[in-house]
């Protein structure tokens, strides 16, 4: 028996030694050279001959120096084919290493390094590769800033957003003459017992939120408060980096604690379609799934892997899950506005409906004309993401989507304020051979037909309101709930929700520190920047302010909370208290010091208990 055991052990040991090692990736950052380029190195270990490795990288022209041919595929995806010289039929023969060297732009931050390495081999499931990074040592001038010094002693009634009127003690406080939407008044007597008066259900809810946030035991005081804007929003993008139902509910909890009242839910974009539509199952079977089975370069079975490297995972909400989200939000006085970004940013739905047509032969939901010869490059590096808005089938498709959304809200007994149709960043070169202005008119009027037939309001990014014919503009104004102004001071005649990128885009990095995640195309955004927004300096009919959490640089819920906290609180403050008075830089510094110390004292301990990742000065 002893000899048999030793034999088995030796056999297992031999198998372990002889078994091919799992492929891995290694990426090495090179220094910037005199021409402004950097020599980057990618090393693939133990990759089988005849296989392929995909990875994601923000688009950049590359000069190859050494390694196998590297091909640019859709958008930000690249792949490397590992050549095979073996004629014995042995498919698992591995190269010890495959080295690729190329000149590209230097990294502005480490999060811009190539990522989402995925190994493909015929007849085997796709699998992510473990990746090791070697970044340049951070120079001293890039070191994080020193801790912020708070110069304010927090008082018992200090919470975020800050309360407009406070009087400590039991002396009565003169009430305001007008009671706007969301107004409430709390009187706490000498024994710490509160009494609440509110103008409406919203006010009663906000009073309860305030009472929950005040430190215990309650001090004798009178509080009176109300929001300056009826719209206080948070835009959550789940199409680039998907958030689970539980994660969305946690974000709703945060929103409610800051008295925000609109969740702008960005659930369809180029990268994925995140809402189940019962009568169009391909939308999520294809548009919510990311892999390339059997080297499917044409994406006939699924979308290519997204930049976060997820393969084959569910990245959509079932009808029941979506209803759970909108019910939970409404219980917290938050309305959910779904966004299906159109006519650009529509790649996931386009590809899904192409798959549907191939399977069924039914072209009634076709979203892109097969005869379209347009050549364009979108802001996110896609070349095939624009709807052919002249096709009647585009509006047949969105009629089905709108009807399903209406049904979900009606069954959930939750109000549907509007459907957001996006409308931003249609790249130059789209709709080749057709008049661009005419195409925009066709699209806006087609969407308005759908909305008016159903008694719906629409919303969109500011782009949809520009350059319209007078009749179309007047028609849009009648059906429009709001436009998000993200790139200008405002547009006269339209209800505007302020979403200026340099102040409200939470996905922008905190600073130029290489270790920070995020983009920087509109500058850097921290809680001081969001707090410094002055809505009263913008033009137009301002109905609210919205924070935007785009997710192209997020890879986890920790990333999401890190970019939110504490940045988002500056937006919550400006949406509730929209008219700051800063006659001098010193006045601003004093006001911000007060705000930030309240955040440190009242908010951060809660985040620590909940285990959220957040940034602290």
Image: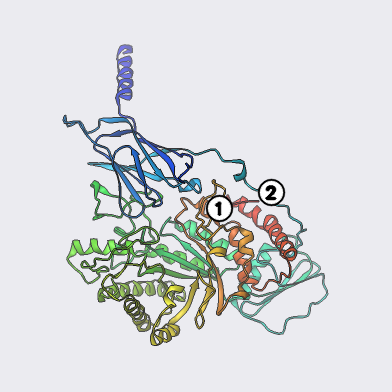
How far across and how far down the image is residue 609, in percent? Answer: 62, 51
Viewer-nearest of discs 1 and 2 = 2
Residue highlighted by disc 1: 562
Give left or right: position of 462 versus 138: left
Q: Which residue is nearer to you in this view: 205 or 527? A: 527
In the depicted structure, whether residue 388 falls above or below residue 86: below
- Write the residue at 46% across / 68% down: 326
Q: Which residue is nearer to you in this view: 606 or 108? A: 108
The answer to whether any part of residue 461 appears in the image is: no
Count the numbered circles shown: 2
Q: Which residue is nearer to you in this view: 502 or 202? A: 502
- Write the residue at 25% across / 74% down: 393
Residue highlighted by disc 2: 147
- Mark earlier in primary sequence (1, 2): 2
Q: Is label 1 in a helix, a strand or a loop? A: helix
The answer to whether any part of residue 57 appears in the image is: yes
- Write the residue at 47% across / 76% down: 417
Image quadrant occupied by the N terminus: top left
* Measured Cα–Cα span from mark 1 to mark 2: 17 Å
User: What label sits on residue 1 in the rendered view?
Assistant: none
How far across and how far down the image is residue 404, in percent? Answer: 35, 72
């Amino acid at each position: 028996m002893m000899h048999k055991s030793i034999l088995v052990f030796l056999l297992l040991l031999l198998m372990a030694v002889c078994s091919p090692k799992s492929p891995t990736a290694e990426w090495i950052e090179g220094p910037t050279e005199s021409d402004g380029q950097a020599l980057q190195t990618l090393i693939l270990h133990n990759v089988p001959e005849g296989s392929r490795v995909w990875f994601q990288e923000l688009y950049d022209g590359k000069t190859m120096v050494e390694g196998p041919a590297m091909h640019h595929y859709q958008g930000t995806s690249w792949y490397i084919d590992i050549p095979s010289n073996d004629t014995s039929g042995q498919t698992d023969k591995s190269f010890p290493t495959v080295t690729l060297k190329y000149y590209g732009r230097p990294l502005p931050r480490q999060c811009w390094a190539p990522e989402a390495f995925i190994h493909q081999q015929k007849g085997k499931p796709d699998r992510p590769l473990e990746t090791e990074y070697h970044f340049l040592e951070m120079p001293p001038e890039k070191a994080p800033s020193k801790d912020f010094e708070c110069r304010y002693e927090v008082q018992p009634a200090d919470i975020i957003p800050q309360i407009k009127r406070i009087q400590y003690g039991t002396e009565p406080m003169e009430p305001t003459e007008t009671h706007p939407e969301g107004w409430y008044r709390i009187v706490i007597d000498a024994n710490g017992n509160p009494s609440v008066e509110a103008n409406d259900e919203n006010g009663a809810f906000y009073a309860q939120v305030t009472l929950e946030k005040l430190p215990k035991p309650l001090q004798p005081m009178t509080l009176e408060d109300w929001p300056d804007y009826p719209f206080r929003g948070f835009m959550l993008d789940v199409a680039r980096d998907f958030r689970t139902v539980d994660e969305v509910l946690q974000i709703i909890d945060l929103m409610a604690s800051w008295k925000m009242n609109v969740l702008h839910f960005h659930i369809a974009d180029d990268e994925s379609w995140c809402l189940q539509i019962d009568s169009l199952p391909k939308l999520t079977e294809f548009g919510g799934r990311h892999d390339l089975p059997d080297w499917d370069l044409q994406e006939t079975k699924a979308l290519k892997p997204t930049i976060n490297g997820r393969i084959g995972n569910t990245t959509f909400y079932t009808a029941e899950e979506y209803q759970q989200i909108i019910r939970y939000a409404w219980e917290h006085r938050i309305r959910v506005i779904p966004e299906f970004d159109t006519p650009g940013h529509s790649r996931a739905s386009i590809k899904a409906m192409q798959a549907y047509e191939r399977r069924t032969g039914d072209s009634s939901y076709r979203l892109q004309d097969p005869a379209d010869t347009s050549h364009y490059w979108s802001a996110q590096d896609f070349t095939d993401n624009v709807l052919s808005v002249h096709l009647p089938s585009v509006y047949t498709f969105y009629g089905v989507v709108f009807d399903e959304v209406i049904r979900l809200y009606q069954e959930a007994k939750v109000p549907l304020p509007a459907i957001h149709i996006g409308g931003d960043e249609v790249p130059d070169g789209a709709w080749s051979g057709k008049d661009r202005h005419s195409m925009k008119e066709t699209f806006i009027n087609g969407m308005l037909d759908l909305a008016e037939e159903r008694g719906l309001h629409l919303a969109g990014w500011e782009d949809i309101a520009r350059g319209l014919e007078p009749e179309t503009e007047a028609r849009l104004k009648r059906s429009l709930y709001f436009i998000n102004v993200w790139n200008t001071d405002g547009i006269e005649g339209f209800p505007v929700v302020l979403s200026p990128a340099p102040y409200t885009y939470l996905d922008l990095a905190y600073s130029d520190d290489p270790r920070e995640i995020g983009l920087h195309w509109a500058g850097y955004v921290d809680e001081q920047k969001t707090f410094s927004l002055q809505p009263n300096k913008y033009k137009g009919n301002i109905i609210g302010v919205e924070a935007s959490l785009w997710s192209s640089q997020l890879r986890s819920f920790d990333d999401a909370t890190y970019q939110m906290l504490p940045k988002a609180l500056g937006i919550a403050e400006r949406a509730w208290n929209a008219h700051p008075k800063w006659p001098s830089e010193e006045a601003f510094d004093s006001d911000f010091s007060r705000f930030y110390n309240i955040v440190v004292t009242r908010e951060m301990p809660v985040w620590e208990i909940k285990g959220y990742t957040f940034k602290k000065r």
